[in-house]
Amino acid sequence: MSLCYDFSKWIIISLALVAISLTVGLMMLVTYGQQLNNTNSTDIIKSKISLEIEQDQRRLESLQELRNYCFQHADRPNPILDLVDKGFLDESFVGEACKSVKVMIDKVQIDIQLLFFYFLTTNYLQNPIQDSYFTV
């Protein structure tokens, strides 16, 4: 029997063509999906970094207010302990002094600077500045 009339050979050939087309389609879908995920992952990283910067800035503001309270009530032995006793501060502040608030402020400021630097570098890597800006 010739190839044209053999039904099982045509089934095998058509199944092979379907398998090849599905494989090519799947490969295109995977590569396109990876491209989408790469662009979205940088956006997700940027949003997480900006959220962390905002949280650190709020924490910095509250620590600065706490430091100002320490300055205003410097005549007391430990103004922070008074705020903990009244329930305005968390129990984690027990044993802290006003000097340690300054250390916390410095740490938060360094964290903000590092996050901001990381944010700028990820922004620069995604959108590099043209060399023509730096030429004289």
Image (tube, rainbow, N blue to C red):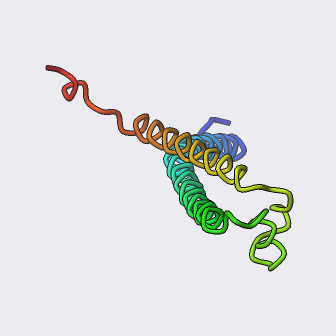
Quadrant for the C terminus, please: top left
- Report the front residue among 5 and 122: 122
Q: Can you see residue 86? A: yes
Q: Residue drawn at (62%, 36%), measured in percent from left and top?
A: 3
Q: Residue furthest top?
A: 136
Vertically, is 136 above or below 93? above
- Report the front residue among 43 and 134: 134
Quarter of the figure with residue 110: top right
- Report the front residue among 133 and 89: 89
Q: Is residue 73 left or right of residue 38?
A: right
Q: Residue drawn at (80%, 61%), measured in percent from left and top?
A: 93
Q: Is residue 132 left or right of residue 122?
A: left
Q: Is residue 88 left or right of residue 40?
A: right
What percent of the width, then of the height, locates residue 104? 68, 50
What percent of the width, then of the height, locates residue 77? 78, 63
Quadrant for the N terminus, please: top right
Q: Residue drawn at (65%, 43%), measured in percent from left and top?
A: 19
What percent of the width, then of the height, locates residue 130? 25, 30
What percent of the width, then of the height, locates residue 14? 62, 45
Label count reads: 0
Q: Can you see residue 29? A: no
Q: Residue furthest front?
A: 75
Q: Residue drawn at (63%, 35%), measured in percent from left and top?
A: 2
Q: Residue furthest bottom?
A: 86
- Report the front residue among 102 and 74: 74
Vertically, is 28 above or below 77? above
